[in-house]
Image: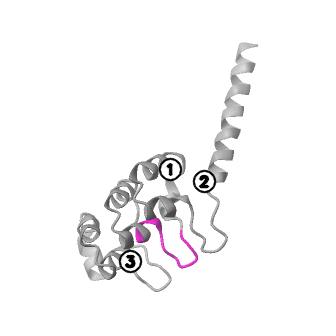
């Protein structure tokens, strides 16, 4: 009977985790952004790190414009978010629908700190783009 209760508790926890994950994966109906985009926009590196433990692929999510959370963080100069995204394997060479990679967003927005943070990963690849 103890094993049955443990199994029930495990199944309940898994269902709860699935519900949490489903909530996290919801996208804004207008622009297609997700909670990772929001966290990047608000320089919430700690939130991004926690999100990645539940949903590792959140760093790959794209809005309707094709931008990833790293694009958003770069445009805002959100160095804390950039560092968290890079630590969780965000792709510095991900292109939006116009072909722009995150460092171009940072450069365009005059976000020197973001440019420097992004150059810590795959410098050669970014400079070739």
SS at circle 3: loop
- Is residue 123 shown left or right of residue 5? left
**Residues in magenta?**
62-71
In the rendered image of this protein, does residue 92 appear above or below residue 54? Answer: below
Marks 2 and 1: in contact by CB < 8 Å? yes
In magenta stretch: residue 102: no
Packing grade of label 1 (10 A; few <14, some 14-19, many >=20) is some
Q: Residue at (71%, 17%) from the top-left corner?
A: 3
Is residue 92 at least partly visible in the picture?
Answer: no
For marks 1 and 2 on the same chain, the one whose residue lies earlier in the sequence: 2
Which percent across, then down, holds residue 67? 48, 74
Q: Examine the image and state in which quarter residue 64 appears.
A: bottom right
Q: Which residue is mark 3?
A: 101
Which percent across, then down, holds residue 38? 51, 62
Marks 3 and 2: in contact by CB < 8 Å? no
Q: Which residue is mark 1?
A: 51
């Amino acid at each position: 009977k103890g094993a049955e209760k443990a199994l029930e508790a495990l199944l309940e926890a898994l269902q709860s985790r699935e519900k949490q994950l489903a909530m996290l994966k919801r996208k804004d109906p207008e622009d297609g952004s997700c909670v990772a985009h929001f966290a990047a926009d608000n320089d919430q590196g700690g939130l991004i790190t926690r999100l990645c433990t539940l949903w590792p692929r959140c760093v790959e999510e794209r809005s309707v414009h094709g931008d990833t959370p790293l694009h958003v963080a770069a445009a805002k100069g959100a160095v804390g978010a950039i560092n968290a995204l890079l630590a969780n394997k965000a792709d510095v060479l991900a292109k939006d629908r116009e072909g722009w990679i995150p460092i171009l967003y940072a450069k365009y927005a005059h976000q020197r700190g973001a440019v420097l943070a992004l150059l810590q990963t795959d410098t050669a690849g970014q400079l070739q783009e």
